[in-house]
Image: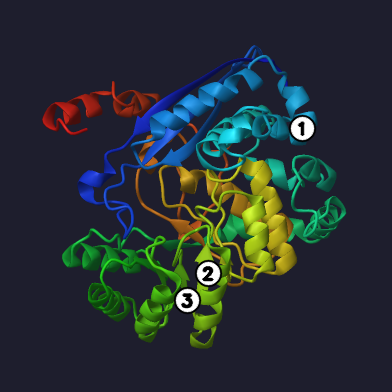
Amino acid sequence: MVKGKITGLSVKDVRFPTSLGQHGSDAMHTDPDYSAAYVVIETDAEDAIKGYGLTFTLGKGTEIVVCAVKALSHLVVGRNLEDIVANFRDFYRQLTSDGQLRWIGPEKGVVHLATAAVLNAVWDLWAKQEQKPLWKLLVYMTPEQLVSCIDFRYITDVLTEAQALEILQNGKQRQEAREEHMVKHGYPAYTTSCAWLGYSDNQLQKLCADALKEGWTRFKVKVGADLQDDIRRCKLIRDMIGHDNELMLDANQRWDVNEAISWVKELAVFKPLWIEEPTSPDDILGHGTISKALAPLGIGVATGEQCHNRVMFKQFLQARALQYLQIDSCRLGSVNENLSVLLMAKKFNIPVCPHAGGVGLCELVQHLIIFDYISVSGSLEKRMCEYVDHLHEHFKHPVTIRNAAYMPPKDPGYSTEMKEESVLLYQFPSGDIWQQIISENTEI
């Protein structure tokens, strides 16, 4: 039973200096510092349970998201949690449709990242009060409850409330068997950790060898900066992992449309399953052109990690511009908006392969994709969830990977809570880690 009035909302700028080791580096983001605008919600309930939420950033600019969270806080503090969850759609709309704040969106950019952080904290609080991990909270909600959390505005030409209800009702069939399968085997994952663009060949080879020993069979390679270098690195990795394992490519928006087609054709010899983010994330028709050109080669297009909102996903699906849909737990408007995208993907029969390359993203998105399998898609065909082996040690309930699969979380909540000591160490710019780095580097 949810309870309590929200009495406080705080937000911190937490940054990890991953750029020092080239972790997360790609063709467009060469020096990322994995970071988060980290939100804590408190209530007056006797249990004193707090809700924790975050949105993912790359260092500079996190302070802007923090400002946006503070601008939204007046819409949250003073609200009863019971009232929020009883009419979650209305609460979502209040956050995304503020008459003044929406002008710097709407439902995109910094203000939407801030909305995700706030809503992620609310979902964490709700799941904790119900004493369930978030995926299980979702699985055992009624179809009517789930639908009541979704804002269908702008997508009813593709997905109506009645259609969503029917999909969720059908998803209840054999739900228990799928839950048992998840608990026993977990959700299949792929690794991006072996082949960041800034890694040396020796580092890449060692990480690949270690991953193969650990049972990984799906590998993603960053490409896009230099064709000859891409050919060399892809050959190196394909030779290491063999032809029975999957290889995916990720250009992180580096190319123009025609350039993407010609570049990937040069890499087709390595039999990649997909090319991810080949061009601007906003160019829906461009993705469609690339998809058509690469289809005869058996190479799909994957995208979504920087897709602003459900409307863009709707258009990607309508244009058949992607073959693998990549939701993000912190780019979209939290669980609420991700629910609508999962349902649209089900209607179009497009596999969902979530983005999780960032601090906390693995912890969050595992809940969404496990729910998707149990209650929406009911399928694991052509489906896998990204995994990066970075920064999990800073979370109270980090992901558990077994046999290259996400094992369903058991602890109540959305797995969003960071360790207090980590927040203190890495808070920017006051944390001890950053004070040391700043003293050594005047450019930061």
Between the C-alphas of marks 2 and 3, the distance is 19 Å
Please name the amino acid that badge 1 sits on: Asp
Answer with left or right where residue 378 lies relative to residue 441.
right
Q: Which mark is residue 90?
A: 1
Please name the amino acid that badge 2 sits on: Gly
Instruction: Please rate how many residues cluster around mark 2, counting C-alpha atoms within 10 Å: few if below 14, some from 14 to 19, many from 20.
Output: some
Residue shown at the point (52%, 38%) measured from the top left: 113
Q: Is residue 234 above or below residue 414?
A: below
Instruction: Please rate how many residues cluster around mark 3, counting C-alpha atoms within 10 Å: few if below 14, some from 14 to 19, many from 20.
Output: many
Q: Nearer the viewer, residue 110 or 427?
A: 110
Question: Visible in this render: residue 262?
Answer: yes
Answer with left or right where residue 122 lies relative to residue 143.
left
Q: Nearer the viewer, residue 435 or 135?
A: 435
Instruction: Please rate how many residues cluster around mark 1, counting C-alpha atoms within 10 Å: few if below 14, some from 14 to 19, many from 20.
Output: some
Please name the amino acid that badge 3 sits on: Leu
Q: Quadrant of the C terminus?
A: top left
Q: Which mark is residue 286?
A: 2
Q: Secondary structure at mark 3?
A: loop
Of labels 2 and 1, the one closer to you: 2
* Residue 188 image offset from top left, x and y in percent: 52, 63
Q: Nearer the viewer, residue 378 or 317?
A: 317
Query: What is the image's colouring?
Result: rainbow
Between the C-alphas of marks 3 and 1, the distance is 40 Å
Q: Residue furthest right?
A: 162
Q: Which residue is mark 3?
A: 273
Q: Is residue 242 above or below residue 205?
A: below
Q: Residue furthest left?
A: 440
Q: Which badge, 3 or 1, comes first in the chain's sequence?
A: 1
Q: Nearer the viewer, residue 10 or 311?
A: 311
Q: Is residue 274 above or below residue 207?
A: below
